[in-house]
Image (tube, rainbow, N blue to C red):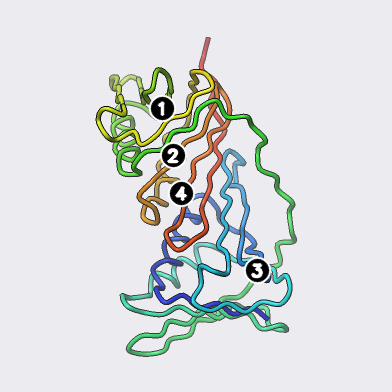
Amino acid sequence: MFKAVLADSKIWRNIIESISTLVEEGVFIADPTGIRLRAMDPSRVAMVDMELPKTSFDSYECTEEVPIGVNFDDMKNIMKRTGGNEKLELEKLEKEARLKIRFKGKTSRTFSLPLLDLGKEELSVPRISFLATVKLPASTLMDAIKDAEVVSDFVKITAEDERLRVTASGDRGEVEVEITKDSGELLSIELKESAHALYSLTYLSKMMVASDLSDIAILMFSTDMPLRLDFNLPNGGRIVYYLAPRMEAE
């Protein structure tokens, strides 16, 4: 049996939104320590890794490992029905192949979501020694990504000399965004050496949906290697994305 309660249902709604932008189906693993999910997008270009410890919940009951396979579009449609000031209850009984999603506010509404038997794919996160770790407001990163989208489908991210540069070019023009500590928008930067890589704006834009959950984004990358993008959740836990680079033409 698994049962968890959140006083603010919008937290779970935003978590589901952040996952569903990349993943169609996946398996939450609930155990006595909390809930986690690791899944790849259908093209296997990006991965999402979510952890929510039991301390993030107002109450949490789970005595053994419980797999919860879901279709994220279906769960997202249910979570869209939550209003403000509603409590959320998630419940999976031992012999039921359904997840009960209950909203408690002015009324009590219970949805029953059929669970999927997706097996348990063991995914490992990329083992990378990151050259650059950059911490900045999520809104600043979002603005830079939107600027790049005006002219291209890909963005080059460069960390060097205590600054982060976001550049893009294409048939529609060119753009360069420079973020420095002097501006107050670069909260911290750790460089083992300068680094740069090219990434898909389509995927980065989808990942930035998680900015609804966190004011701060943490970028980690190395030259022509996968990007790691972290969002720490205010109630504990985190959502981490990994994105494969696009190799630049010679």
- For disc 1, the neighbor class at 10 Å (few under 14, some 14 to 19, many from 20) is many
Q: Identify residue type, mark 1.
A: Val
Q: Give whichever of discs 4 and 1 has the lower sequence position.
A: 1
Q: Answer with mark 2 or mark 1, whichever residue precedes in sequence.
A: 1
Q: Nearer the viewer, mark 2 or mark 4?
A: 4
Residue at 52 percent of width and 18 percent of height? 193
Residue matched to label 1: 155
Q: Earlier in the sequence, mark 3 or mark 4?
A: 3
Q: CB under 8 Å between callouts 2 and 4?
A: no
Residue farthest to the bottom, as pictured: 107
Rounded to the nearest angstrom, the CA distance separating label 4 from label 1 is 20 Å
Rendered location of residue 129, percent (x, y): 62, 29
Q: CA distance from mark 3 to mark 4?
A: 21 Å
Instruction: Please tell me in which quadrant of the rendered image residue 127 appears.
Output: top right
Looking at the rendered structure, the secondary structure element under dot 2 is: helix
Q: Mark 2 and 1 residues: CB-CB less than 8 Å, in contact?
A: yes
Nearer the camera: disc 1 or disc 3: 3
- Mark 4 crowd level (few <14, some 14–19, many ≥20, 10 Å Cα): many
For disc 3, the neighbor class at 10 Å (few under 14, some 14 to 19, many from 20) is many
Between disc 2 and disc 4, whose residue precedes?
A: 2
Which residue in the protein does label 4 denote? 231
In front here: 9 or 7? 7
Q: Amino acid at mark 3?
A: Ala
Residues at marks 4 and 1 touching, judged by CB atoms closer than 8 Å: no
Measured in 3D between alpha carbons, the distance from the residue under mark 2 to the one under mark 4, in whole angstroms, is 13 Å
Sequence order check, earlier mark of 1 and 3: 3
Find disc 2 in the rendering and name its residue.
204
Whether 131 is drawn above or below 236: the answer is above
Circle 3 residue:
30
